Image (cartoon, rainbow, N blue to C red):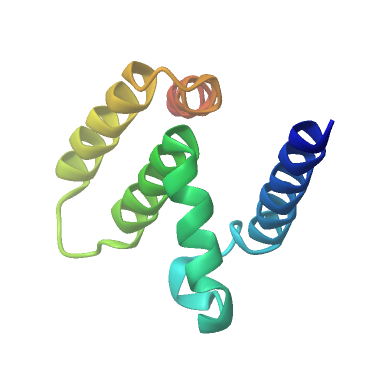
Amino acid sequence: MARLKEQGKQHSAQWQQYKLAKRWLHRDQDRIPSAYQQQIASVRASSPALDKLLTMREELRQLWTRTNVSAEQLVADLQAWCQRAEDSGIAELRAFSMRLRAAKA
């Protein structure tokens, strides 16, 4: 019984970290207060899928903000990003990529 109780405490602490991270993860990395950076890094380390999702979101943000490349290069880069998103194995990335591809048509 003590072992189960201890496991419950560990899961509760981890759940609290996820809840905290959820409050901040919709923001760009540079907009997250430094006080929360370590906790968010811990959550990302414990979830490879979440880390991949956030990494790809940052890559997409950087794609959209580039102004020094041609429209053709942006299209090619976006298509490559969509392919990587679809190959990632993460359902949310795949669905988002499909919506992006449908929007350009």
Residue at 46% across, 32% down: 49
Q: Nearer the viewer, residue 78 or 34?
A: 34
Residue farthest toward the front in the current orientation of the protein: 2
Quarter-of-image position of residue 16: bottom right
In the picture provided, is 53 more to the left or to the right than 12?
A: left
Q: Position of residue 84 (x, y in %)?
A: 28, 26
Front one among 42 and 85? 42
Q: With 11 as the anchor, is 64 left or right in this view? A: left
- Residue at the spot 75% in from the left edge and 43% down from the top edge: 6
20 displayed left or right of 100: right
Picture coordinates of residue 52, whole percent (x, y): 39, 38
Q: Position of residue 24 (x, y in %)?
A: 63, 64
Q: Residue at x 30, y 52 (%)?
A: 63
Image quarter in which the C terminus is found: top left
**What residue sits 55% from the left and 65% below the top?**
39
| 67 relative to 96, above or below | below
Q: Is the N terminus in the top left, top right, bottom left or bottom right quadrant?
A: top right
Query: Looking at this view, is 47 or 95 the one in front?
Result: 47
Residue 10 to residue 62: above or below: above
Q: Nearer the viewer, residue 37 or 96?
A: 37
